[in-house]
Image: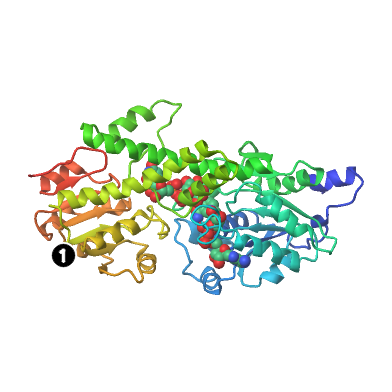
Amino acid sequence: MLTSVQKVFKTQNCGLPPWEIKSEMPFKRKILCIGAGYVGGPTMAMIAFKCSQYKVTVVDINPERIARWNSDDLPIYEPGLDEVVRAARGRNLFFSTEIEKGIRDSDVIFVSVNTPTKTFGAGAGMAADLQYWDKTAREIRKHSQSSKIIVEKSTLPVKTAQAMERILACGDNGLCFDVLSNPEFLAEGNAIKDLENPDRVLIGSSQTTEGLLARDVLVEIYANWVPKNKIITSNIWSSELSKLVANAFLAQRISSVNSISALCEKADADIQEVTRAVGMDSRVGNKFLNASVGFGGSCFKKDILNLVYICRHYDLKEVADYWEGVVRINDYQKERFILNMLHVMFNTLAGKKICLLGFAFKADTGDTRESPAIRITKRLLEEKADLVITDPKAIDNAKDDLKGVTGSISYVEDPYEAAAGCCAIAVMTEWSLYKELDYREIYRKMAKPAFVFDGRNILDHPALHEIGFNVFPIGKPSLTHF
Ligand code: NAD
Ligand code: UGA
């Protein structure tokens, strides 16, 4: 039975597209993903899990990462990931460092390498650093022996596909490469659920016959488990830009709420009451309105800065300034949190033991990239506080992040032990286990007066106050005994 793509080629009497000819049995298609990180690993595991007819190989230049993907101790923590990997690994899911072989053998290549903010030269601190992306394109060109579909999975500046096509097109091997954009919208800590049941899958392609046929191949892969009405297609530039804009909108929502949280603290209003009222308007919606110590994660800041950089490049100063404000408010929120701690703890933190509950940038992940806890730690150390850091999954990453930072820091897995002897605890991550701790017991072993700074508004503030704590939530009146 011919696939829809094969049928089109037959009816057009131009033979099978090159990436259709070479797939050998028993696998219908050979998929490669370059980059075995937070996106490449889980997304490919899900494709392999859902589609046993495809062989899925994930390669990386980092041999330790690959070794861990092949072990029982996966390199990232995501609820449900272990089960998905265990079901598919060795059957049709493979992790390898053999990049050259992987490229040679595949029909469809996802590129999911990191695209961090550039730290050098033109655009430093704003633009995306595309060196890993560029190297990957050159590797693909160098090792390919057949034509392929290349899928941008990484988040990239709009128009990057054009650069990819130009790099790939200048080979003298007569091969053709169709570049698609298929941005990933998963959120960490929720990756498996997001991949299994995405709000949408977006596929951007060039609008040529070849581009549309390549797009259909990718649609066919996702259609194995994603309902057709959730697989949307667009031109390639809209797709690339939609990813940056989606993250900018989400981050803007948090900065909007956080900016109002500052006003609530001055006006004796309660941010949760305000967001409940505002979010019940169905045009606004009630999700993603939690005030916090600030958003973190590897992408929000970098993607907004990238958007700002692109706007400046096109001379859209007002647009750039508007979006840059989202990042400025996020920095302001972290600084506000620290200055509040300093102020209410009698204007000195020197020598005071403070426990940070959580270090991950959000719950259910060990990822600490751009975690607000990093900035808070550094600022508390500048004030010469003694820090105790606890987190159920992120202590190893915290140690890496704080390597070389001077000051007194200890890492303690058990939250009760971590809080013992401290003057204050500050909630950095919304781990649900922190809601269930015995705060009476914690209070008993803390220095007095004892403070709680709830950077996530997850604790029962009146109950803590009743125990004896001085409680400082975000965007709500404080509850003190002074
Ligand atoms: P990551 O740093 O976890 O993983 C990237 C991997 O690519 C690393 O393991 C690195 O060793 C590997 N790599 C780099 N250059 C390579 C090369 N030339 N050959 C082979 N491997 C190479 O990054 P991530 O969080 O998975 O993000 C990847 C992309 O996906 C980024 O563009 C990011 O913006 C985007 N994204 C991330 C998330 C997320 O939740 N983390 C969500 C959506 C989109
Ligand atoms: C975010 C997006 O939600 C994903 O759609 C996107 O694919 C991803 O970025 C990416 O491109 O990397 P992620 O950063 O993993 O996902 O996690 P989020 O749930 O979006 O949280 C980001 C940060 O915002 C966290 O620090 C979180 O604690 C904070 N946040 C979130 C709030 O402070 N308040 C909220 O109401 C929601």
Who is closer to the viewer here, 253 or 187?
A: 253
* Residue at point 18%, 56% (across, down): 424
Q: Quadrant of ligand 1?
A: bottom right
Q: Residue at x 15, y 53 (%)?
A: 347
Circle 1 residues within 10 Å: few <14, some 14–19, many ≥20:
few
Which residue is the site of mark 1? 351
Q: Secondary structure at mark 1?
A: loop
User: Which quarter of the picture shows residue 402?
Assistant: bottom left
In-front residue for pair 379/27 = 379
Residue 463 placed where, x, y %? 16, 44
Task: Determine the image quadrant of residue 172.
Answer: bottom right
Colouring style: rainbow
Question: What's under tag 1, amino acid-wise?
Answer: Gly
Against 312, residue 37 (above or below) is below
Across and down, in percent, residue 220 comes to 70, 47
Is 445 or 137 nearer to us in this picture?
137
185 relative to 458 in the view: left or right:
right
- Regarding residue 84, the answer to whether it shows in the image is no
